[in-house]
Amino acid sequence: MDNETEKETPETNEEMETPETPKTEKTEEKSKELQSALAQKEHFREKSEKLEAELAKTRQAEPNPKTATPAVQDPVALAKLAKTLGAYNEEEIDFIIRNAQSKSPDGIIQAAQDKWVQTAIQAEREKVEKGKTPPPSTKQTPGGKVKLSDLSSAEQREYLEDMGLIRKRPV
């Protein structure tokens, strides 16, 4: 029995040494660049798996806004919103919505009633109004004088009435 045990022991040692030798040689043969690339690959694989797990948790916590059905709005709040925004044009409504604290009807109504928003809208309206020039009521020459020959008879009569040269007709 002792002989058999001795025979088995050396064979077992030889078998164990043989597989280890190629692994060590393979590791030694790999260049530093390859080792670095493999380490980076493993690092980014772990990072990717971690981020995918976080993304899955986030998607479960928040429903997709495109597929989620919109919340039912209070019809009274919508009527108040329509009444509040009725006096504004499209650009002014966009401005109000941008300045609202929330996109809910109540938030937009509060923004429309804010004195700073109203002042800004009024200033813009005045700026636009100043930019408009009234159309001339009579034809004038470059010197600022009117040529009666260029006016129609109705325009001539109106011009002379405005100048006080003739009396206005009773209506």
Image (tube, helix red, strand yellow):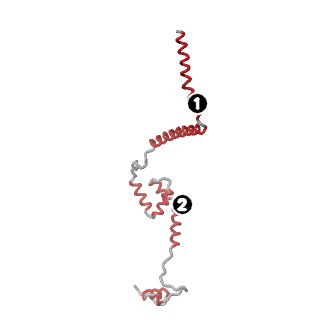
* Residue corresponding to mark 1: 25
- Of residues 34 and 145, the one nearer the viewer is 34
- Of residues 101 and 7, the one nearer the viewer is 7
Residue 74 higher or lower than 115, as above or below: above
Residue 65: image x %, image y %?
A: 43, 49
The secondary structure type at the circle numbered 1 is helix
Classify residue 30 as left or right of residue 56.
right
Residue 59: image x %, image y %?
A: 45, 43
Q: How many numbered callouts?
A: 2
Q: How crowded is mark 2: few (under 14 residues within 10 Å), some or many (20 or more)?
A: few
Instruction: Give amino acid for label 1.
Output: Glu
Q: Quadrant of the C terminus?
A: bottom left
Which mark is first along the chain, 1 or 2? 1
Q: Are marks 2 and 1 in contact (CB under 8 Å)?
A: no
Which residue is pictured at 58% across the width and 35% down the height?
Answer: 30
The image quarter containing residue 37 is: top right
Classify residue 131 as left or right of residue 83.
right
The image quarter containing residue 153 is: bottom left
* Residue corresponding to mark 2: 116
The secondary structure type at the circle numbered 2 is helix
Which residue is pictured at 43% across the width and 63% down the height?
Answer: 86
Residue 46: image x %, image y %?
A: 53, 38
Instruction: Give amino acid for label 2.
Output: Trp
Q: Residues within 10 Å of mark 1 (few under 14, many from 20)?
A: few
For marks 2 and 1, give the CA distance.
77 Å
